[in-house]
Amino acid sequence: ICSGYGCSDHYYESDTLLHSFQVLEKLLESPATQDIICDVGMPVLHRNVCYNCRVIFLNKKILLIRPKTALANAGNYRELRWFTPWSKARHVEEYFLPRIIQEVTGQETVPFGDAVLATKDTCLGAEMCEELWTPNSPHIEMGLDGVEIFTNSSGSHHVLRKAHTRVDLVNSATAKNGGIYIFANQKGCDGDRLYYDGCAMISMNGETVAQGSQFSLDDVEVLVATLDLEDVRSYRAEISSRNLAASKVTPYPRVKVNFALSCPDDVAVPTCMPIQWRYHSPEEEISLGPACWLWDYLRRSKQAGFLLPLSGGIDSSATACIVYSMCHQVCLAVKNGNADVLADARRIVNDETYIPEVPQEFCKRVFTTCYMASENSSQDTCNRAKLLAEQIGSYHINLNIDVAVKAVVGIFSMVTGRTPRFSVYGGSSRENLALQNVQARIRMILAYLFAQLTLWARGMPGGLLVLGSTNVDESLRGYLTKYDCSSADINPIGGISKTDLKNFIQYCIETFQLTALRSIMSAPPTAELEPLVDGQVAQTDEADMGMTYAELSIYGKLRKIGKAGPYSMFCKLINMWKEICTPREVAAKVKHFFRMYSVNRHKMTTLTPSYHAENYSPDDNRFDLRPFLYNTTWSWQFRCIDKQVNAL
């Protein structure tokens, strides 16, 4: 158990510390914790310094408070903002317990520091989240000093294709050194952009023996394994290099515990055998992770459902499929007897007798889709949106925004005496862009109006959360109108690439039999904001952007994960693309990307909170901290590129 990173700056408040101790008091007194060594995470103020700690207790007695030694301070994490790492290795001090805990435990002080527990039959050590990921993890020297069981309570968020890294780290923790590793991870939406995806596991001697679920609507999951400590001892006995290192290790302080984890008559009890970890494909991860996040957000916000502007394109269709997957997960959880999910579903639909059994039927109650046509919309996208809505079961609305667009442009014309025109009718690029933006922004206004009042018009209580559907690549390039339909309450696909979304659409065709997605897959992505030519779409996303979605993914990964500025990106790409581009062409592409990225970076300051699924997300909130006012000529950097091009 841990208090979670989601408290953020509330860790500065004494209330958070007080309430943590109040919850600890309840846990100490609970009959459910009796005769179990419990390992609970919470902030603890020791000598006026706040530490992220494990509080380990048994039968109403606190055995040890173990502060974290390595803090997570990269990417989404800011632990050093709130906590101080414990830097006194193998050192223990006295901690004076608050009175509410003293009254329960009868203890005035308890050990606080870097120590391990010695029971009658084994030795246990606690590791915390980031400590597993550091080069010199505590489990290394703990294991050398005879610790046989390691616990790790973690707050590790979901990222596509990350699960294998976590599993490999846990298994490798005991492969070289032997031992049993018990890994627990937070589950669900913690109130922000991250989804914590469980994946609890138990590993012994480098092999997984128990696997928890990665995506589940269950708030609580218990993972159990029966293991033989003698298997750890015999495994370690034959590793001579490990034993030589162990003979020289500085010993940890040991807290003696008058308790045994094993029984004297358990010889005949069968032990668990190693299992093969079952990984989800990226498409399954997209189907399940954001769906669980949406459900958590919906039930905790106490709203009555979602509204999605459904354009008939890949991005909004993928968002609709994620909501449909959420409905599928809810029906499955209820079928499996999850009373909490059933209670939440009944409250959301305002029906105390309701039982969600068919995903399409539940979808009709909680999901409204809206196709907002204009004179620039094609009949094809209208039909695609309507057919998909029918297949997933959403309550679908068709409307036309032309009256509103003409009214807004008419106000401008009345004030200025000038009427802007699209470029195909002789207008300038400024006029063309402004006319596109008016359509996009009116759709945002209508989305919020219908989200607030659609259920009222249908005689039903509550309001709807507006879903956005801009993908991570479009955000990076800034290929979106500020305050258009990309502006919403939350966005389940904002951290997912176009390439992955296309693969996810194909997965939905096969898994959910959503045949309407076939024509959506084959159509070229388009904003449909410019006039049609002979009734057909003339505008396409990739032509508008001046780059392909595949290129955008590469730029994004090099910029964020590869830490590449314009010059470094050029140097990497001339080798990556040497078969398809000359250095001069690479230079032009890199310059165009950075010019567009910097011109549009200001849009990231108002980006809708999105499910974090990629490590190259441009989320300006806390993950990707950059200026939003750039010198968009990049004069020094581009000169360095030009110099290199000429040399080549």
Image (cartoon, grey):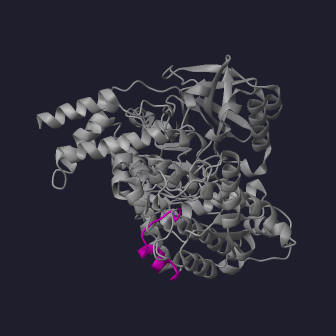
Q: In this view, does 16 lie to the left or right of 292?
A: right
The stretch of residues the image draws in magenta is 513-529
Tell me the quadrant of the picture where the C terminus can be found.
top left
Relative to the observer, which residue lies in front, 610 or 437?
Answer: 437
- Give the x, y percent position of residue 567: 27, 34
Q: Relative to 37, does residue 201 appear above or below in the rendering?
A: below
- Give the x, y percent position of residue 467: 64, 59
Q: In this view, does 536 lie to the left or right of 603?
A: left
Q: Relative to 18, does residue 408 appear above or below in the rendering?
A: below
Relative to the observer, which residue lies in front, 584 or 510?
Answer: 584
Question: Is 522 part of what is drawn in magenta?
Answer: yes
Location of residue 642 by image quarter: top left
Q: Residue at x 76, y 68 (%)?
A: 345
Residue at the far front in the pictured view? 417
Q: Is residue 490 left or right of residue 145?
A: right
Relative to the observer, which residue lies in front, 16 or 446?
Answer: 446
- Give the x, y percent position of residue 164: 40, 55
Location of residue 465 by image quarter: bottom right
Residue at the far top in the pictured view? 47
* Whether residue 441 is visible: yes
Residue at the far left in the pictured view? 648
Relative to the observer, which residue lies in front, 15 or 474?
Answer: 474
Tell me the quadrant of the picture where the N terminus can be found.
top right
- Magenta segment, prevailing SS (helix, strand or loop): loop
* Whether residue 268 is visible: no
Question: Is 99 part of what is drawn in magenta?
Answer: no
- Count of marks overlaid on the render: 0
Q: Residue at x 81, y 76 (%)?
A: 354
- Give the x, y percent position of residue 600: 48, 42
Q: Relative to 572, does residue 96 appear above or below in the rendering?
A: above
